[in-house]
Image (cartoon, helix red, strand yellow):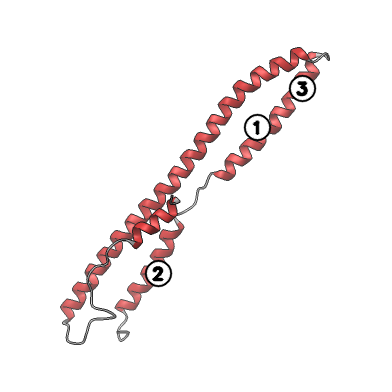
């Protein structure tokens, strides 16, 4: 099974390239043909970049939705379980109830802090890195294409 990022790259790598003469148009090609090829290549590149950004953002969103769901579920179950445990321990321990309640409250706070730290670490609010890198490479490619004398 692919991770979300592997699925994105697998999709990008399986896209059929547009037919083109490589490495550059031959001198017999007209300027209009060259400009047309450049325009079609650029349009296809923009389309692929948009698809990459959508896929990467979707993967990030799903990761965060799952993390938030896990945190909410853990919080609800923890509260329900702790209510029953708290009541049972307070009644079962032969020391004054307020001491037992205080000890348990401290333990619950420590557990809550650990859960919050783990949940926060699992959340990922980051820009789509692969899309940004790809856009930088595309910008360099476009600069190479429009630079005179580089063909």
For image coordinates 57% across by 31% down, the residue present is 74
Q: Which image quadrant: the C terminus?
A: bottom left
On the image, numbered disc 1 is attached to which residue?
A: 112
For image coordinates 23% across by 81% down, the residue present is 25
- Give residue 34's position: percent from left, percent from top: 20, 78
- In the rendered structure, the answer to whether residue 18 lies left or right of residue 120 reads left
Inter-mark Cα distance, 3 to 1 = 15 Å
Precedes in sequence: disc 3 or disc 1: 3
- Residue 121's disc is none
SS category of the residue bearing label 2: helix
On the image, numbered disc 3 is attached to which residue?
A: 102
Q: Are marks 1 and 2 in contact (CB under 8 Å)?
A: no
- Foreground of the two, 144 or 51: 51
Q: Are marks 3 and 2 in contact (CB under 8 Å)?
A: no
- In the rendered structure, the answer to whether residue 99 lies left or right of residue 116 reads right
Structural crowding at the residue carrying mark 3, measured as other residues with C-alpha within 10 Å and reported as few (<14), some (14–19) or many (≥20)? few
Precedes in sequence: disc 1 or disc 2: 1
For image coordinates 30% across by 77% down, the residue present is 145
The relative height of residue 114 versus residue 47 in the rendered view (above or below) is: above
Inter-mark Cα distance, 3 to 2 = 59 Å
On the image, numbered disc 2 is attached to which residue?
A: 137
How many tags in the picture?
Answer: 3
- Give residue 39's position: percent from left, percent from top: 23, 69
Structural crowding at the residue carrying mark 2, measured as other residues with C-alpha within 10 Å and reported as few (<14), some (14–19) or many (≥20)? few
């Amino acid at each position: 099974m692919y991770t979300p990022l592997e699925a994105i790259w697998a999709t990008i790598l399986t896209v059929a390239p547009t037919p083109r003469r490589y490495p550059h148009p031959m001198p017999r090609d007209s300027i209009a043909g060259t400009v047309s090829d450049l325009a079609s290549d650029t349009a296809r590149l923009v389309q692929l970049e948009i698809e990459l950004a959508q896929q990467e953002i979707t993967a990030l969103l799903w990761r965060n939705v799952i993390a938030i769901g896990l945190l909410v579920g853990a919080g609800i179950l923890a509260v329900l379980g702790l209510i029953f445990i708290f009541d049972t321990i307070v009644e079962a321990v032969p020391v004054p109830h307020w001491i037992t309640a205080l000890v348990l409250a401290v333990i619950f706070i420590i557990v809550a802090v650990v859960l919050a730290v783990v949940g926060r670490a699992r959340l990922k609010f980051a820009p789509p890195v692969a899309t940004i890198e790809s856009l930088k490479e595309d910008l360099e490619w476009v600069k190479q294409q429009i630079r005179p004398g580089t063909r």
